[in-house]
Amino acid sequence: MTNLTRWDPFGDMRTTMDRLFDEGFSRPWRVMPATTEVESTFPIEVSETDEALEVKASLPGINPDDVEVTITNDVLTIKAAHEEKTEEKKKDFYRREIRYGSFHRALSLPVSVDADRAEASFDNGMLQLKLPKAEAIRPKQIKVGSGPTVVDGTAN
């Protein structure tokens, strides 16, 4: 007698996905591209007032001259670099948690801002940005006066 085997159109794909989950996520260095430059991120805080957006970014150990801030199409981009100083003497590290390399963060701003009037300061590793809101989105106050109301050209 002959044995019949049911054809599974997803058999090869299932095997590939199983291998991805078994090896790819448990050992991500196998699927991640190797780069010489380590990309990292940093904590950021965004708040809003009536007049502006205020952004704080924690960049400890970064020189203010190595920070680049740009705004394009309501996307704020902060780039920085922290280069490791090499020493002649070899060291064996017990723990190494200080990050070196480039740091990059881009985020969409919740409102349009006037980039020409933006202000930036850097103190003790904390970058602070004040991004004034664009005039078109600022709340406008309409003065209410007393007297007759005009509707369709007639006073009420």
Image (spheres, rainbow, N blue to C red):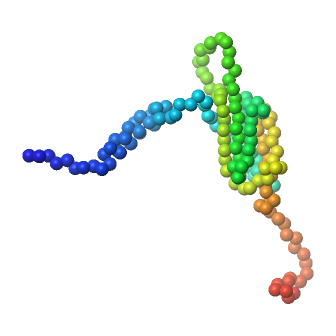
Instruction: Say which residue appears at 82% left-offset and 65% top-offset.
Output: 140
Q: Residue at x 66, y 33 (%)?
A: 102
Look at 82% across and 45% down and name the residue there.
119
State whether residue 70 appears in this view.
Answer: yes
**In this view of the protein, can residue 52 be seen by the observer?**
no
Side (left or right) of 105 relative to 147: left
Number of marks present in the image shown? 0
Above/below status of 29 relative to 7: above
Give coordinates of residue 32: x percent, y percent: 50, 34
Residue 128 to residue 73: above or below? above
Task: Name the spot of residue 48 as percent of width and height, x first.
Answer: 75, 52
Q: Quick one: quadrant of the C terminus?
A: bottom right
Does 86 sit left or right of 3 as displayed? right
Q: Position of residue 76 (x, y in %)?
A: 71, 47
**Farthest left residue in view:** 1
**Left-right relation of 16 to 116:** left
**Quadrant housing residue 120:** top right
Percent coordinates x, y for residue 5 in the rendering: 20, 47
